[in-house]
Amino acid sequence: MRGLYIHIPFCRAKCGYCDFASAPGTPGDMDVFLKALALEAASYPALAGTFRTLYIGGGTPSLLSTPQLKELFSVITGLTGEVRLLAESTFEANPESLDAGKAALLKEAGISRVSMGLQAAQDALLKRLGRIALSGDFLKAFGLLRAAGFGNINADLMCGLPSQTRKDFADSLEWLLKLGPEHVSFYALEVHEGTPFSAAGVEEEPEAAADMYEAGAAALKLAGYSRYELSNFARPGRESAHNLNYWEQGEYLGLGPSAASYLAGERRANTPGTAAYIRALLAGEAVPLQYRETLTGRRKHAEKIMLGLRKTGGIELPDDIFIEFEAETARLTKAGLLERSGNRIKIKEDRLYVSNAVFREFV
Ligand code: SF4
């Protein structure tokens, strides 16, 4: 059973730090995109009915109008059958484009989980990030989702932001926890080339971000959330099944610009260009790819380890892979970064913030 990811490449405006495939679009642009998406979905008839989880991300999926959302769900159900029967189905929303009507439609369509970006509770920081929704908008959208019956909500928070203090981050988390989301994700600011932040010379603050991460992780633990992946925290039983499939090297199909897939050992990603994506599909051609590679042998095993080590429970390795990487795991265990029990290896909890150094050993 696989995961299905759908990328909706539209946002009302671009945030200063964002390098995702997304841009403002007119209602007409969104209609044409949905036509192209339907054609791409129809090109995978053999996968229909094989999906266990669904994740509709972006971009800002909640920017689609009510009729467009209905169209989107009719495309999706062609591949998944009834959405409510999936093990998990997540919809990403931004507060500025969510209303009671859309929340009710998502519930009606069978969506079981909603993920929303808060990023920070201080409006001055949100404005500096170029976010449209301020903390009051998040509060309102959160209430709409609860009123519509959503009992599984994730909220994203960012750390290491320009001028963000450790207290700002702690206050944001405390503010969020009063709402009681079932799941929280942390993201450290990364400054990517081509973004307004990069042009403005904003610098990453990895040390401050690591401090905020660790303090935040401790606060979430006290509040009854467990860290099950480097950046993800959940109430018991609320871990994201869709994302766990990625970290377990399970198969997934991604539809839409920039969407990545992993099928039969092949990893590939669609072009990030929405115009090129639409043009190809409407002309009856295959979607241009950003990359395509087949993972085999040691590289496939190394990737399996790196993905598995993202989970705080680590990864149980089959004997042959364990032996193949015995030298690397011995070195990391001796350096105090890894813990080993039988064939299970995991990064020590107090070393999760240097996970990139651990991953580098396996590349
Ligand atoms: S809302 Fe999300 S996807 Fe859209 S521009 Fe902002 S960060 Fe990027």
Image: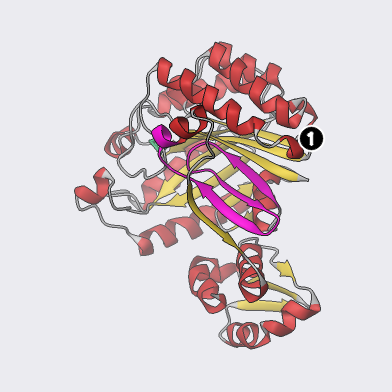
Give the magenta-colored segment's residue range: 251-276
Q: Label 1: how many residues lie within 10 Å, few (<14), some (14-19) or many (20+)? A: some
The image shows residue 322 at horizontal and vertical percentages of 73, 80
Q: Amino acid at mark 1?
A: Gly
Q: In the figure, residue 16 lies in which quadrant?
A: top left
In the image, is residue 275 part of the stretch drawn in magenta?
A: yes
The colour style of the image is secondary structure
Q: Hey, which residue is sitting farthest left in the picture?
A: 200
Q: Nearer the viewer, residue 357 or 179?
A: 357
Give the residue displayed 50% in from the left and 75% down from the top: 360
Give the residue displayed 71% in from the left and 54% down from the top: 250
Q: Nearer the viewer, residue 130 or 326?
A: 326
The image shows residue 312 at horizontal and vertical percentages of 65, 62
The image shows residue 363 at horizontal and vertical percentages of 53, 75
Q: In the figure, residue 21 lies in which quadrant?
A: top left
SS at circle 1:
loop
Which residue, given by chain and number where applicable, does mark 1 sit on?
A: 49
On screen, residue 45 versus residue 259, left or right, reads right
* Quadrant where ligand 1 appears: top left
Give the residue displayed 49% in from the left and 69% down from the top: 356
The number of discs equals: 1
Give the residue displayed 35% in from the left and 36% down from the top: 122
Q: Nearer the viewer, residue 83 or 210?
A: 83
